[in-house]
Image (tube, grey):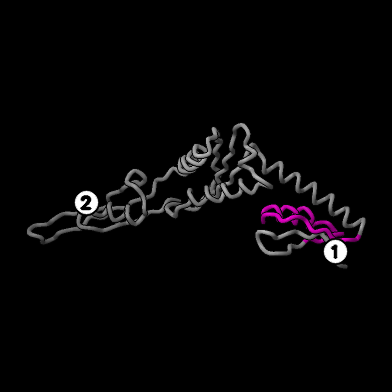
């Protein structure tokens, strides 16, 4: 839902200016509805102030596209976008050649770029939309890799009786490990350490 404000001032133009300043937007990014045109009255008697309703009218997809265009232009990269809006989630899939540099080690660079894109899109002028950034379905492939890893390591823990501590992971990846093994009757998982070095531990479930 877009943010909207109602402003009362001496004139319509003045009310619009106040509203735009309050929303922190340009004139081109708002819709204006004049509720009362206002009047000067006769010799100042019976004067009525103008009332306007100004609503943010921002294309969040274009805002995200513009930000990413600038990022990749500065990197000297040609990248295409597939942008899909699903309610409060905006999914952006990046397509191009040699995009491994955008993913980074264990998706570190991709996560950082996703965070910056979220900051750019969500400036407080409209309802919050979560941006999910992906590179040719890397996240889905990474999730399947983590699910397979979790199951294999759980089997090792059961066989050896010794707990296993994984390498540091982001919170969303740790969540995948926990979710994969939460229904396993033989092992339990928990996290140790502080960010950004927090790790998942897989251990024999206490009876």
Describe residue 194's horizontal placement relative to residue 84 as left or right.
right
Residue name at image x 76 percent, y 45 percent: 145
Q: Is residue 142 magenta?
A: no
Q: Secondary structure at mark 1?
A: loop
Q: Secondary structure at mark 2?
A: loop
For marks 2 and 1, give the CA distance: 71 Å
Q: Position of residue 138 (x, y in %)?
A: 67, 41
Q: Position of residue 144 (x, y in %)?
A: 75, 44
Categorize mark 2 by other alpha carbons within 10 Å: few (<14), some (14-19), many (20+): some
Q: What residue is disc 2 on?
A: 37
Q: Quadrant of the C terminus?
A: bottom right
Residue name at image x 59 percent, y 38 percent: 93
Towards the viewer: 11 or 43: 11
Q: Position of residue 131 (x, y in %)?
A: 55, 47
Towards the viewer: 141 or 165: 165
Describe residue 91's horizontal placement relative to residue 127 as left or right.
right
- Sequence-wise first label, 2 or 1: 2
Cβ–Cβ under 8 Å for marks 2 and 1: no
Categorize mark 1 by other alpha carbons within 10 Å: few (<14), some (14-19), many (20+): few
Q: Position of residue 179 (x, y in %)?
A: 74, 55
Q: Is residue 184 magenta?
A: yes
Q: Is residue 202 shown above or below 69?
A: below
Residue name at image x 61 percent, y 41 percent: 102
Which region is colored magenta?
161-189
Q: What residue is disc 1 on?
A: 205
Q: Is residue 99 shown above or below 107?
A: above
Residue 24 circle label: none
Q: Is residue 120 shown above or below 188?
A: above
Describe residue 67's horizontal placement relative to residue 134 as left or right.
left
């Amino acid at each position: 839902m877009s943010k909207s404000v109602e402003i009362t001032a001496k004139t319509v133009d003045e009310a619009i200016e106040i509203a735009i300043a309050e929303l922190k937007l340009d004139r081109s990014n708002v819709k204006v509805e004049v509720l009362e045109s206002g009047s000067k009255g006769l010799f100042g008697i019976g004067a009525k102030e103008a009332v306007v309703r100004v609503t943010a009218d921002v294309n969040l997809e274009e805002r995200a596209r513009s930000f990413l265009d600038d990022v990749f232009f500065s990197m000297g990269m040609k990248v295409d976008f597939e942008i899909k809006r699903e309610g409060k989630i905006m999914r952006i899939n990046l397509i191009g050649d040699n995009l491994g540099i955008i993913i980074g080690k264990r998706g570190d660079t991709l996560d950082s770029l996703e965070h910056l894109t979220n900051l750019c899109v969500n400036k407080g002028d409209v309802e919050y939309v979560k941006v999910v950034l992906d590179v040719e379905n890397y996240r889905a492939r990474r999730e399947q890799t983590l699910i397979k890893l979790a199951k294999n390591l759980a089997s090792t823990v059961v066989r050896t009786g010794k707990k296993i501590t994984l390498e540091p992971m982001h919170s969303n990846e740790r969540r995948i490990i926990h979710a994969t093994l939460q229904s396993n009757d033989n092992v339990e998982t928990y996290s140790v350490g502080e960010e950004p070095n927090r790790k998942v531990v897989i251990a024999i479930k206490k009876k």
